[in-house]
Image: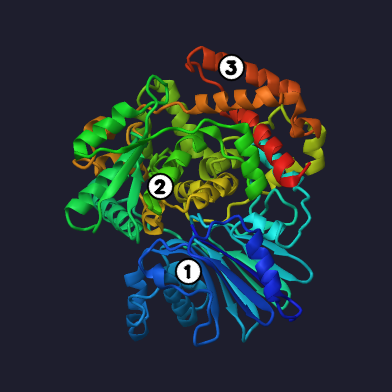
Amino acid sequence: MSGIAGVVYGDGRDVSPALLEQVSTASAIRADDGVAHWAGGSAGLIRFRHATTPEALGERQPSPAASGNVIAFDGRLDNREELIAMLGRDGAALRQRPDEEIALALFERIGDGFMRHLAGDYAFAIWQPDQRRLFCARAPVGRRPFFYHLSADGFAFASEPKALIVGLSLDRGVNEPLIAEYLARRVVTRGETFWRALNTLPQGSALAYQDGALRQWHWDDAPPEDLSRLSEGAHIERFNELLDQAIIACTRSNTGVVAQLSGGLDSSSILSRATELHRAGKIDRHVAAITARYPGSPVDESEWSGAVEAHLGITARVVQGSIFDPDAARAWSANTLQMPLRPNTLDTLEGNFRNLERHGERVLLSGEGGDELLNGNHAHWPDEIRRGRIDLVARQALAMPGATLPGKVRAFVSEGFGPLVSTTLYRRAALRQSWAGTALPDHLSPAWIEATGLRARIAASRPAATLPGIAAQNRYAVIDLESREIATGPLQALPNAYGVEYRHPLYDQRLLRFILGASGEVLFRNGARRHLFREAMRGTLVEKVRTRQSKAIFNTLVVDGLERFYAQREIAAQWPVKLGWVDGAALQRIWNAYLAWRDDGAHFPVPRIEFGALWSTAALDIWLENAVGL
């Protein structure tokens, strides 16, 4: 992964080369292909270069265009040909040029709204010297972080927090209200970070800094096309076209490309379709597979990943999972100022990234997004009722498997009519706030809840974009969940440490727009989640995996990791407890229940909210001590 940073003074004084050097030296980003600075009057930009596409090998950014505008671009454009065509004669000269030159040319042609035409993964900053204006934006599914610091003197930004906190010697005070949201598992506030001195530009948002004033807005708010009346066959055909387009775009690379293979539907589909496209001559490279094996463990998925390998006639590389090491987690937070990664996330990924680094490969594909975007649910029922199609909703309710007739009637009323008349049920359906209207967790201090204004922050929460229909809002909420920003921060920093770009074909914006407008019945038919995805994979994916309904239980890895951490620091000694934020006795009760669950073979369920309480408290303890310096 690459990165960007920059400083703009609002009072017009010059940015010194020494300041830019200070910011870039402080950064934790690994820039295998070098770091470049540009300074021009009151603005200075930094580019941490790590080429992952053929065109990026020749890039020279940040550097001024003929107009004088300068771009610092971190990312990848997945619809280059379409954008080049939009530029007409000017576009022909950019066919072999890096992505940032296409982006800047389109900005100069269209203006601030040009991002609506982009597909890909990006965050960028454009300095317009004639207007003394800095314009910045992030992709709708923002996997390229963008932190910023606003002061009376100016504006500074970077792809990761250390460049600003250390590079600008900022105050390390913590943002307790957002931490309260995090510990309560109610993260609703956009644009804030755990640092008081830093904000983040939310995904699908843009900002402009000019003459000392900052303006910020959410630009990704276009209503999706209503596809609810398309046939299932038409849905499958369109989905397959868009999925192929996304995979082809994500395999554009100047090194080998590798795909994760977990044995689940999502990653297995991406690898199988990529293999199919290569054999059909639509992808110019073989996509290698990488998998993890845990013989005898409840998280082992070799039965299913092996079936995919046999079906495709390939042999996947096998990596060993990483064991959660509390000392390594502390070193990570100290070196990057990021939160530590959960053991069940770190476990497989670190081995994958390490393996790619050893092979000199820079691109790893994931199946991330399938669970979130394609599962389907009943959120389309209120929309159909508004359209007068009550009979359709009634038929779908009666077809619900495993439910009694009274249960089907209750679902028909609460999920079909409830969101139309109840604010609480609307929030649950449209915004995916499963906790809407429920009490706050009892492991948090009531006094601290009041001091942080947690209840008021939750009550004031609003979606970033207001889309027509509860179903579209429900599906957009998956990528609009504020908690994703907190969760993906360290997850994006990890591949940087190994020189790998982590790509997610299922998050392609063109595919996402289709899913937002798709028929709810096709996504979720007769109680079968991911119906559309499974039907689209007929003939591509081995039947054993295509029809699989089970999932591995990775929570045991977190329990094992916490046990190692607690051996060094008991719950009562952790900073969130000592600071009076968390009730240590309540956490201890939760921990005792998890130990019993693990020792009993991880069979009986434990509420997810309690699971999050254990890890979030431990993670904050590590971060507070090693990144903040308590």
Q: Residue at x 46, y 72 (%)?
A: 100
* Mark 2–mark 1 distance (CA, rounded to whole Å): 36 Å
Q: Pinpoint residue 359: horizontal percent, then vertical percent.
A: 37, 49
Question: Horizontal placement of 558 versus 437: left or right?
Answer: left
Residue in the foreground of this view, choosing between 607 and 233: 607
Quick one: label 2, few (<14), some, or many (20+) residues within 10 Å? few
Of badges 2 and 3, the one in the foreground is: 2
Q: Point out the tag, 2 or 1, that comes first from the N-terminus.
A: 1
Residue 408, horizontal then vertical, whole percent: 41, 26
Vertical relation: 410 (above or below) 245: above
Under circle 1, the secondary element is helix
Amino acid beneath label 1: Met
Does residue 61 show up? yes
Between residue 627 and residue 35, name the one nearer to us. Answer: 35
- The secondary element bearing badge 2 is classed as helix
The kind of residue on which mark 3 rests is Leu
The label number, if any, that marks residue 449 in the structure image: none
**Amino acid at the residue labelled 2:** Arg
* Whether label 3 touches label 1, CB < 8 Å: no
SS of the residue under disc 3: helix
Q: Which residue is mark 3?
A: 595
The residue that label 2 is drawn on is 358
Give the Cα separation between the discs numbered 3 and 1: 49 Å
Please name the residue shown 34% across and 75% down the image: 96
Tell me the residue that label 1 is attached to.
115
Residue at position x 18%, y 57% from top?
281
Quarter of the picture containing the C terminus is top right
Residue 270 location (% of width, % of height): 31, 46
Q: Which of the 4 image quadrants contains residue 206?
A: bottom right
- Mark sitting earlier along the chain (3/1): 1
Q: Nearer the viewer, residue 481 or 262?
A: 262
| Residue 460, position as x, y percentages in the image | 69, 49
